[in-house]
């Protein structure tokens, strides 16, 4: 019988050190590895840009968690995405992505790949007829899905969009950063490639920046392996260690993040200072039914639109005491931020611009009563 998710989180790719018996895989800082015959590495390792035992342990773990064949870990989520795109795209190719994708990914596609002759179109993935029309007419090489999206929390039907994309010969990439494999397995729904900013929930403690690409096809994996090896945007051994350390508790953390976020969303939906809460666990969310089908819980991210506009949004950020005002997400501590002024500033004036009255909350795993008390006093203070 295949091992369960939590067992694989702890054990996949993690063998005791053969020399000392150390249970935790060592952080192999060596940049180079000895050979006894020229061109024949003793244990398969040659030079740490190409391969490093600590990074290999993380990569095996990530491949197992997503149910993929191979995984490659990078210095950041953006480095991972860039490595994938450069492994498959050439001038004249096209990318289709959601009209509320992560702003940094949109910026790379529009401003870095655009001048290299790679086109792109953005779309609301909820309208499947329009999605089919766009994909049929632009014949994209890659369809980039993010679900839930950052920061509007939209839900994309992975299975439906993957089926359409495959009918027209496109590869389907799913950014699984918000849900993580603990809650959502894109390969089981038809994805070809899974992307992570491991900076977020996989690392889980706001102490490491990293990214990963997971693949199920050996030929595609070989191409990404080459870009990782040749171009070198690798994760360091220490970063790989920290990420593995975080992953061991991913399953239980995601359960608690999801419980806390649902409780907060339910508690403050309808509060007089709130215009709308965007959380897929609420039955009022337009993607609730799809999320309930493709996710095992709804995750720890939510956004709130304030009735008092941008002024209320920026004031709220200064009124919370437990929710720290900072970008990023996915750590054990609760964070709050203003995407329009912070994480998504780069998409101002584009089709991806986010509402000015929106704050994004990364709900941590603190005691729920403390989180409710803090958000209640901050929201009440706006009235
Ligand atoms: C959904 C999503 N994808 C990708 C990235 C990029 O990851 P990184 O910041 O690790 O480069 C982010 C970063 O915020 C993100 O939120």
Image (spheres, rainbow, N blue to C red):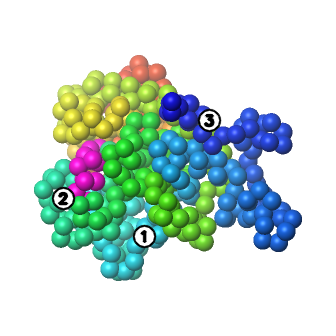
Range of the magenta residues? 153-165
Q: Residues within 10 Å of mark 1 (few under 14, many from 20)?
A: some
Q: Which residue is mark 2?
A: 131
Query: Mark 2 near ligand 1 (CB under 8 Å)?
Result: no
Q: Residue at x 78, y 63 (%)?
A: 41
| Residue 198: percent from left, percent from top | 51, 48
Q: Which mark is first along the chain, 2 or 3?
A: 3
Q: Is residue 39 left or right of residue 257?
A: right
Q: Is residue 77 left or right of residue 56?
A: left
Query: Is 161 a magenta residue?
Result: yes
The residue closer to the viewer here, 22 or 4, is: 4
Whether 50 is drawn above or below 327: the answer is below
Q: Which mark is first along the chain, 3 or 1?
A: 3
Which quadrant of the structure image shows residue 360? Answer: top left
Numbered label attached to residue 11 = 3
Q: Which residue is mark 1?
A: 88
| Residue 334: percent from left, percent from top | 45, 34
Q: Between marks 1 and 2, how big is the CA–CA gap?
A: 22 Å
Which quadrant of the structure image shows residue 22? Answer: top right
The residue closer to the viewer here, 345 or 288, is: 288
């Amino acid at each position: 019988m295949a091992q369960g998710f939590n067992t694989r989180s702890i054990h996949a790719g993690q063998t005791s050190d053969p020399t000392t018996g150390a249970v935790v895989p060592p952080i192999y800082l060596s940049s180079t590895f000895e050979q006894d015959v020229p061109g024949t590495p003793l244990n398969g390792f040659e030079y740490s840009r190409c391969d490093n035992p600590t990074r290999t342990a993380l990569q095996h773990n990530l491949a197992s968690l997503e149910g993929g064949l191979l995984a490659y870990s990078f210095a950041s989520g953006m480095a991972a995405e860039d490595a994938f795109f450069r492994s498959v795209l050439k001038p004249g190719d096209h990318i289709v992505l959601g009209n509320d994708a992560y702003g940094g990914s949109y910026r790379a596609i529009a401003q870095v790949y655009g001048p290299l002759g790679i086109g792109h179109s953005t779309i609301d993935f909820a309208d499947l007829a329009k999605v089919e029309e766009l994909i049929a007419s632009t014949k994209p090489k890659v369809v980039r899905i993010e679900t839930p999206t950052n920061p509007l929390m939209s839900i994309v039907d992975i299975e439906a969009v993957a089926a359409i994309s495959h009918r027209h010969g496109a590869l389907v990439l799913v950014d699984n950063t918000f849900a993580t494999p603990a809650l959502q397995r894109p390969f089981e729904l038809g994805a070809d490639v899974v992307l992570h900013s491991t900076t977020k929930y996989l690392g889980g403690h706001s102490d490491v920046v990293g990214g990963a690409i997971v693949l199920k096809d050996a030929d595609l994996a070989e191409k990404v392996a080459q870009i990782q090896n040749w171009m070198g945007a690798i994760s360091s051994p220490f970063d790989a260690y920290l990420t593995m350390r975080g992953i061991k508790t991913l399953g239980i953390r995601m359960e608690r993040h999801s419980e806390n976020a649902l409780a907060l969303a339910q508690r403050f939906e309808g509060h007089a200072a709130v215009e709308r809460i965007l959380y897929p666990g609420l039955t009022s969310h337009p993607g609730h039914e799809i999320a309930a089908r493709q996710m095992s819980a709804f995750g720890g991210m939510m956004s709130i639109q304030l009735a008092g506009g941008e002024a209320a949004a920026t004031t709220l950020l200064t009124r919370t005491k437990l929710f720290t005002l900072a970008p990023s997400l996915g750590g054990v501590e609760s964070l709050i931020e203003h995407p329009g002024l912070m994480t998504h500033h780069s998409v101002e004036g584009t089709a991806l611009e986010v509402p000015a009255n929106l704050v994004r909350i990364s709900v941590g795993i603190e005691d729920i009563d403390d989180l409710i008390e803090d958000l209640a006093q901050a929201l009440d203070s706006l009235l």
